[in-house]
Amino acid sequence: MNPAVDSVGPAWSLPAMRAAQAQAWTAIERLAAAIHPGLRESEAKAVGEAIMADLGMGQAWHPMVVRFGANTLRVFSDRGGEDLTLAENDIFFIDIGPVLLGHEADVGATFAVGKDPEMHACAAAARDLWHRVAAIWNHGVVRGTALYARAAQEAEAMGWHLNLDVRGHRVADYPHPSRQAGKLADLDSLPTPGLWILEIQIRHPTRPFGAFYEDLLG
């Protein structure tokens, strides 16, 4: 570990971090299945929060984000925008950060409804790009700065634009000020497995929608 950026609390363990992520992925799939055309973002978020509570995931280290349509272009910190309604042919993403097994789980994924092929392709591309970039990282062989430079290149090669304002971040056991370590895209060292969330947000080259995917490196 690099002490300057890889500090953890006394409860942190890599197996627990991975198990927390796995539980969060189970939740996000259930949340996605409950979202359907006709819901507003605010309504979908309320449904998601009820499901999380039912799963015993009421505690979170960051608020749930649900974005529909054109709002899928907005970054996490942008809390403005219209409360959009999911259309019959549409795209949406969910981002959750529950505290599980005493660790800061963080997962996000994009889904498409209906028959718009480009929306389905965009949702799949965000996931596929994440896996391409994770393979480039190769368990801590490539620096964070180089990783996002390559991510931008890969996105363009796939026909999408990468949002470099979304740059990844630290996680650890909870509570722990791990996010003070800075962004993954600014890390001029090798990211340690199990401590960094790789975030990918892309946009369609001409149409007003995008996709988001995030998971733990390692």
Image: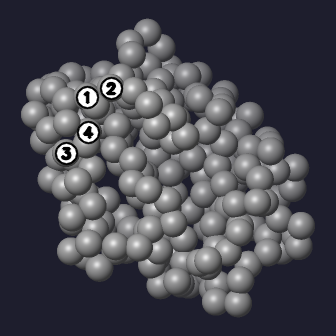
* Rendered position, 143 above or below 159: below
Badge 1 marks a residue whose secondary structure is: loop
The circle drawn on residue 84 is 1
* Figure disc tally: 4
Q: Where is residue 110 in the image (x, y as percent from the top left)?
A: 35, 42
Dots 1, 2 in contact, CB < 8 A:
yes
Dots 4, 3 in contact, CB < 8 A:
yes
Residue picked out by circle 2:
82
Q: Position of residue 203 (x, y in %)?
A: 47, 24
Residue picked out by circle 4:
41
Amino acid tagged 2: Glu
* Rendered position, 121 above or below 55: above
**Structural distance between the alpha carbons of marks 4 and 2:** 9 Å
Tell me which label, 3 or 1, sits earlier in the chain: 3
Residue picked out by circle 3:
43
**Structural distance between the alpha carbons of marks 1 and 4:** 6 Å
Tell me which label, 1 or 4, sits earlier in the chain: 4
Tell me which label, 2 or 3, sits earlier in the chain: 3
Badge 2 marks a residue whose secondary structure is: loop
**Structural distance between the alpha carbons of marks 3 and 1:** 10 Å
**Structural distance between the alpha carbons of marks 2 and 3:** 13 Å
From the image, which quarter does the N terminus lie in? Answer: bottom right
* Rendered position, 75 above or below 215: above
Dots 1, 4 in contact, CB < 8 A:
yes
Closer to us: 192 or 172:
172
The residue at 65%/84% (across/down) is 12
Q: Position of residue 30 (x, y in %)?
A: 22, 61
